[in-house]
Amino acid sequence: MALRLDRFLAEAGVGSRSEVKKYIRAKQISVNGLLIVRPEAKINEQKDVVTYCGKRIFFTKYVYYLLHKPAGCVTATEDAIHKTVMDCMADVARPDLFPVGRLDRDTEGLLIITNDGELAHALLSPKKHVPKTYYAKIRGRVTEKEVLLFEAGIDIGEDTRTRPAKLKILKGGEISEIELTITEGKFHQVKRMFLAVGMQVLYLKRIAMGSLRLPDDLPPGAYRTLTKEELEGLRENRGQQREGQSQ
Ligand code: URA
């Protein structure tokens, strides 16, 4: 496949599209040993040997990012009215990226952005029950009663009750702070579970998905690539769910 040199470099993670254009014009990029100074030059990413400052650059088919979704943007690739999570990823020149699952516009936290449809499907499949943990501030006094109700499953107006969910009370009071782990992804699930027990979610942030945790040092709106270990962990989550199914 023929690919523009600047796009190849950006997609391989060398820099943003504008940065790599500068590198090309600064004669820092060579293709098959020849210096190339035109960003629009076409290369074959499977065959051509591309180097940046003498280091070989490899094209990666699949990419995996962890975004700290900020409040105020929608989890979609396009939206006529609102900013989307993809606007946070504007530096990444890969048109095939999409978010894995969905967080509400006012929800913050961990969102995986990838172009790997198979992994996304495995993590989202309702049959796989990948755990997702949320931190929330709740209007109302959350007590052991709600812990037991959530463990037993809640009627949120669907055909079946929610699957057992683990509720941990971090701080009781008129505004409670909790962590909730659910193994499904029904529409507005956390908010609906609390509404069903007469309480309102005031603030919601996803802090974990499978083995992946939202890093403390990643501010809202920032993203980074998943580490090898994080990716392996997610793939294992998927594997464990498969094993779980066959039991
Ligand atoms: N549950 C919700 O209610 N909202 C989210 O964004 C995620 C889970």
Image (cartoon, rainbow, N blue to C red):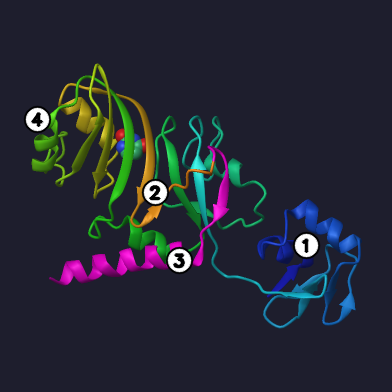
Counting from the top left corner in percent of width and height, residue 72 is at: 50, 29
SS type, badge 4: helix
Look at label 1 and name its amino acid.
Asp
* Among the two numbered marks 1 and 4 on one chain, the one whose residue lies closer to the N terminus: 1
* Among the two numbered marks 3 and 1 on one chain, the one whose residue lies closer to the N terminus: 1
Mark 3, residues whose alpha carbon is within 10 Å: few (<14), some, or many (≥20)? Answer: few
Counting from the top left corner in percent of width and height, residue 108 is at: 44, 36
Residue that numbered label 2 is attached to: 101
* 31 with respect to 79 (left or right): right
Residue that numbered label 3 is attached to: 229
Mark 4, residues whose alpha carbon is within 10 Å: few (<14), some, or many (≥20)? Answer: few
In three-dimensional space, the C-alpha distance between marks 1 and 4, rounded to whole angstroms, equals 58 Å
Q: Is mark 3 within 8 Å of ligand 1?
A: no
* Residue range highlighted in magenta: 219-247
Ligand 1's image quarter is top left
SS type, badge 1: helix
* 12 with respect to 117 (left or right): right
* Among the two numbered marks 3 and 2 on one chain, the one whose residue lies closer to the N terminus: 2
**What residue sits 73% from the left and 64% below the top?**
9
Residue that numbered label 1 is attached to: 6
**What residue sits 65% from the left and 53% below the top?**
92
Query: Of tags 2 and 4, which is closer to the observer?
Result: 4
Disc 2 + disc 4, Cβ < 8 Å = no
Query: Of tags 3 and 1, which is closer to the observer?
Result: 3
Residue that numbered label 4 is attached to: 145
Counting from the top left corner in percent of width and height, residue 171 is at: 26, 27
Mark 2, residues whose alpha carbon is within 10 Å: few (<14), some, or many (≥20)? Answer: some
In three-dimensional space, the C-alpha distance between marks 2 and 4, rounded to whole angstroms, equals 30 Å
